[in-house]
Image: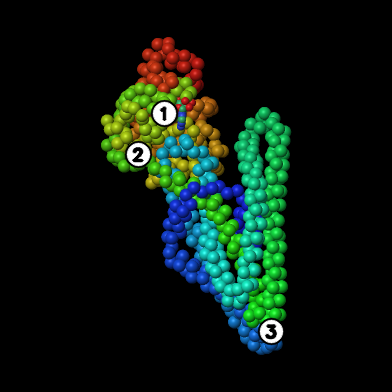
Amino acid sequence: MPPPIMGNRGGNHHGMPVSKARNVSGTLRRIWSYVAKSPRLLTLICLLVVVSTYTTVLGTSLIGQAIDKYIITFDFAGLAQFSVWVIAIFAVSAAATWLQMRLVVSVAQNTIRDIRQDLFYKLHTLPIVYFDRHTHGELMSRLANDVDNVGQTLNQSLIQFVSSILTVLMTVTAMLLISPVLTIIALLILPASIFVTKSIAQFSRRYFSLQQRGLGDLNGLIEETISGQRVVKVFGRERIVIDEFVKKNNALKDAGFKAQFFSGIIYPLMNSLNNLGFALIAVTGGWLAVTGYAGLTIGKISNMLIFSRQLSQPIVEISNLYGTLQSAIAGAERVFEVIDEPAELSDGKLVDKSTLRGNVEFQNVTFAYKKGENVLENVSISAKQGSTVALVGPTGAGKTTIVNLLTRFYDVDEGAITLDGEDIRTLDRRTLRQNLGMVLQDTYLFSASIRENIRYGRLNATDEEVEQAAMLANVHRFISHLPNGYDTVLADGGEGISQGQRQLIAIARVMLADPSVLILDEATSSIDTRTEKHIQQALLTLMNGRTSFVIAHRLSTIRDADEILVINHGRIIERGNHDTLYAQKGFYYNLYTSQFKRVAG
Ligand SMILES: Nc1ncnc2c1ncn2[C@@H]1O[C@H](COP(=O)(O)OP(=O)(O)OP(=O)(O)O)[C@@H](O)[C@H]1O
Ligand SMILES: [Mg+2]
C-alpha cells in the first residue's frame, strides 16, 4: 500500500491501479440505500460539515482583519480581545470537524456491517453449484477485502466530497469579495498543478499495478510453500523454492521502488507549483497595494495568500476521489453481484420427521454437472425403509454424485427421486436435509469444542445426550482421555486429531440428529485397524433401522448390505448381494479381489 500522497486526511490511493466499475450510478445508489438507513445521523453530519467549513473560512478572513485593524495600528489590547473571538471560532470549527469525523466513522461501520451481513446471509442460501464455480479465495476476498474497501472509502469520501466542494465555494466567494484580480491569478495556477500531478500519477500507476501483481505472485508462492511445506521438504525442493522467491522478491523491489519514487515526487512538485502561485499573489498583491489599487491592504493580501493555500487542497482531493471511488465501486459491484445471485428456493412441502418412513427411489435418473457430459445415466435404485444399499465402483464412477442428488445439492436432469413416494423436488430443502444424516468423505469439523461439534447434529441436545451419542459412536473413550475431554477445542477443520477420530465424531453428530435416511461416504484413506473396528461398529449401530446409502470401501460394510450396486461410468452395471455378485465373477468380483479393504477380524 503506498503512503498517503499530498497531505490530505486519510490516504488516497493516488496512483494505485484502478479496477473499473461498470455501473457507477446504480452502485452508488445501492451503497446510498445502506448509508441512508440512518437519516438523522446524516442530517447532523451535513450540518456539521457546513458549520466546520464556514467557521474555517470565517476564521481565516478574521486574521486579515486583525492585521489591518490591530497589528498595523499597534492596538494590542484590541488585538487580545479580537484574538479571543478568532480562537473561539477556530475552536468551534475544530469541534465540528472532530464530531463529523466520529459520526461518519459510525455511519461507515454500520454500512459495511449491513453489507457484510447481507453477503454472508446470501452465501448461506446459495446453491452448491455456486461454490463449484467460485473459488474459496475469491469468495473470501469479496467478504473481506471488497467490503473493507467500501468502508474505507466511505470513511474518507463521504465528508471529503461535501466539505471539499463547500470549502472551494466559500473560499472562492471570500476571495472574490477581497480582490477579483488576485482570485483569478490563484485560480490560474490550480489547473497547472492538477495537470502535473495527474500526469505523474498516471505514470506511477503503471508501476503500482506491477507492484500489486508482484505482491500477489509473491504471496501466492509463500502461501503455497507454507501449506505444502511437507511436500517441499520431502522432495528436497527448498533451494529451488528459495531461488524462485529471491527472483520474485527482487522483481517486487524494482516495481515497488519506481512506484514509490514517482508517487513520492508528486508532493514536492505540487508544493513548488503552489509556492510559485504564492509568490505570484504576493508580488502582484504588493504591487497593486503600492499603486493604491482598490483598497488592498496587507491584511487582505495575507488573507488572499492563506485562501489560495486553502483552495488547492480540496481541489486535489476531489480529483483524487475519483480514483478511490472507482476502485471502491468496483469492489462494491463484486459484493452486490453475490448478493444478487438467485438463492436456493425453499418453498416445498415440509418433511415431517415423525411420519417419515424413509423409502427412497431413484427412477431412471440422468444427470450432468456440465451440459452434455452425463455423469449419471438412467440410474434406478429402490431402497426400502430400513434397508442398506451399498454403492461400489472405481473412483470417478459417480457414487458421490448419486448422494449429491439425494440431498438436492443438485437436481436431476431427467427422471426423478422420491422419498416415501413424493418427488423430492416438491419438498422443502431444509427439512429434507434435516432428515438425511450425512457422514461425508471429507469430514469437516468446526473450530469449536468437541461437544459443540457433536451438538451440531441437534442444537437442543443436553450434555448427557451428546455423551450418549459419543458412546454409541464408540468415541466416548477417546474423548474422555483427552486432557480437556469434551471441551477440547478442535483446530481449524479438525486438524490435530486423526481422520478416523474425526469420522467417529462425525458419526456421533449424525447419531444425535437421528435422521431416517443415512448417507455414508466412507473415507478412502487408510485408518489403523483399531479405529477401523470402532468405526465399523459405530456405523452398524448408526445404520440400524435407517435407510442407508453407503459408498463403501470396507468389505464388511459391503457384505452386510441388502443390495450392492456396482457403478461404472455413471451406470449401474451389476446389482445384487455379495454372494450372487461374487459368484458372477464379473466387475464386482474383480473389484472385490483387487480393491476392497479387508479389515482384520
Ligand atoms: N462439482 C462437480 N462439477 C463438475 N464435475 C464433477 C463435480 N463433482 C464430480 N464431478 C465429476 O463427476 C464424475 C463423478 O464424480 P463422483 O465424485 O461422483 O465420483 P465418485 O464415484 O464419488 O469417486 P470417488 O470414489 O473418487 O469418490 C467425475 O468425473 C467427476 O470429475
Ligand atoms: Mg466420492
What residue is drawn where x is 42% and y is 46%? 340
Report helix, strand or loop for mark 3.
helix
Occupied quadrant, residue 362: top left
Q: Amino acid at mark 3?
A: Ile
Q: Residues within 10 Å of mark 1 (few under 14, many from 20)?
A: few
Disc 1 marks which residue?
A: 371
Q: In the rendered view, tell whether residue 44 sits above or below residue 291.
A: above
Image location (x, y in percent) of residue 249? 70, 42
- Is label 1 or label 2 in front? 1
What residue is drawn where x is 56% and y is 65%? 164
Disc 2 marks which residue?
A: 429
Disc 3 marks which residue?
A: 71
Can residue 91 be seen from the camera position used here?
A: no
Mark 2 or mark 1, which is nearer the start of the sequence?
A: 1
Q: Is residue 507 left or right of residue 267?
A: left
Rounded to the nearest angstrom, the CA distance separating label 1 from label 3 is 86 Å
Decide which of 210, 470 is in the foreground and name it. 210
Q: Amino acid at mark 2?
A: Arg
Can residue 277 be seen from the camera position used here?
A: yes
Mark 1 and mark 2 residues within 8 Å of each other at the beta carbon: no
Occupied quadrant, residue 506: top left
Q: In the rendered view, tell whether residue 17 sits above or below residue 178.
A: above
Mark 2 or mark 3, which is nearer the start of the sequence?
A: 3
Mark 3 or mark 1, which is nearer the start of the sequence?
A: 3
Image location (x, y in percent) of residue 80? 65, 85
Residue 284 - label: none
Rounded to the nearest angstrom, the CA distance separating label 1 from label 2 is 24 Å
What residue is drawn where x is 69% and y is 55%? 264
Q: Is residue 297 left or right of residue 366?
A: right
Report helix, strand or loop for mark 2.
helix
